[in-house]
Amino acid sequence: MNKKNSDFLNEKLIPAFGKFASSRHMVALRDGMAMAVPMIIIGSVFMILAQFPYQPYLDFMNHTFGSNFATVLQYITNASFHLMGLIAVIGISYNLSKSYKVDAISTSLVSMGAYILTIPMIVAKDGSLSIPLTQLDSAGLFTAIIVGLFITDLFVWMVHRNWTIKMPASVPPAVSNSFTALFPGTLVLLLVWIIRLGVEATPMQSIPNVMNYFLAQPLGQLSNTLPGILIAELFVTGLWFFGIHGANVVSGVMMPIWLAAMNQNHAAFAAGKELPNIVTQQFVDNFVHMGGSGATIGLVVMMAFFSKSEEYKALGKLAIVPNLFNINEPIIFGFPVVLNYKIVIPFIAAPMMNILTTYFAMSTGLVAKTMGVMVPWTTPPVISGIIATGHISGGVLQLINILLDGLIYFYFFRSADKAKAKAEQELKAA
């Protein structure tokens, strides 16, 4: 890098990013999503227990507790992990409204109502309504961020202009605050309702489906080739950066293609023929997303054992077990990854590198191709690689990729860790 580019980076670009990251809205976003981390970790534990990839364990649990034991265990997951979108909208709105010195409880409740209003209800045969739980978790996170930020701003704008009902000073604060929120809260919900009706009149059908609608067509043009998987993975990590569950969006379009390729490999393996496909569902699950989206196992290990920041060290130790089972949300929301320019480069680069090394190793015959066995996505690396390929070379390749992923994350982790540790020391001194 020449001096001119270096000066531009240090004097213009980095300060601009720093100012953006420390802005009122970004701080509220970071702190609001951090509120979901404890519930995510709790839910992750029970998700692992319900889907632990070891058949003797599953047989024992089925025999002891019945065939629906996994459903019962995931009651706790449903009440924690699958509420991250709901928790995020409340947390973001709460922290943002506090920064404006407006009643945070009232504002966050209005934002929660606006968020629920964006979700299409399920209508039963008897006419009763229910909210699909899938829209309250990470699938609805992008909507939660938009509502948490912009609806809160709108609500605060109306409060600051006294579009409220004033109560006498003798009225208790709790009652007074509720009446203060009455008029702006009504206008907010009416606005979201009108937007919802407008979207439902289009082919998009619902607000949560807006992003999927615009992404489905370009993603549908991809196939199970090397360029196709690289572009698909760029969508996964890029969407996650903006708070959209990239893996869910992309898999909704690409999974049929990858599963078809897996079935072709399975048929060829059963017939004793050469396996025709490299990119399959197991290629993606077991060799690209080790530790979840962003291939973060190396990052989590560094956080848990080499971090100077007390916050990062504690988070790493809490996240390392879920991460080994490819559950990545504690890091995505706790580090965080969402809208964090300091970590986006390795978050994109690590899985891209996994694609290239794995594709090269399998295309040259150094590593066996995936043979069409459906390996549970919660299976830890090394074990999953051996099962998916039927050969120890699969596990060895995973170890190599994890090491390379760690090297990619190292510089960025060290920089973020140093800044976080310095901030912690300054806070203690203050």
Image (tube, grey):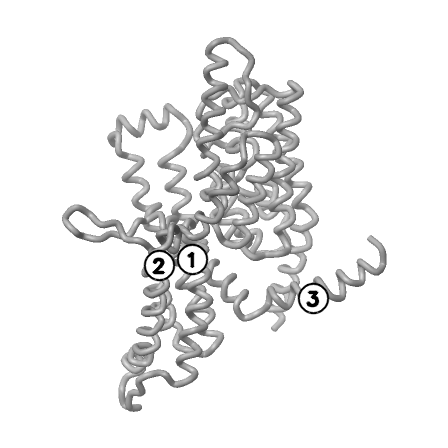
Disc 1 residue type (three-letter)? Thr
Q: Residue at x 35, y 77 (%)?
A: 184
Q: On the image, numbered disc 1 is attached to which residue?
A: 143
In terms of sequence position, does the residue under pointer 3 or pointer 1 come before the other? 3
Estimate the spatial distance between the alpha carbons at disc 1 and disc 2, rounded to whole Å.
8 Å
Badge 3: few (under 14), some or many (20 or more) residues near its Cα, within 10 Å? few
Q: Quadrant of the C terminus?
A: bottom right
Q: Position of residue 125 (x, y in %)?
A: 16, 46
Q: Secondary structure at mark 2?
A: loop
Residue at the spot of label 2: 118
Q: Which mark is residue 15?
A: 3
Q: Residue extending furthest top? A: 272
Seen from this angle, which residue lies furthest left?
126
Amino acid type at mark 2: Thr
Q: Residue 163: image x %, image y %? A: 36, 83
Disc 2 crowd, CA 10 A, few/some/many (<14, 14-19, 20+): many
Query: In the rendered view, would you say 73 is above or below 85?
Result: above
Residue 241, horizontal then vertical, whole percent: 55, 52
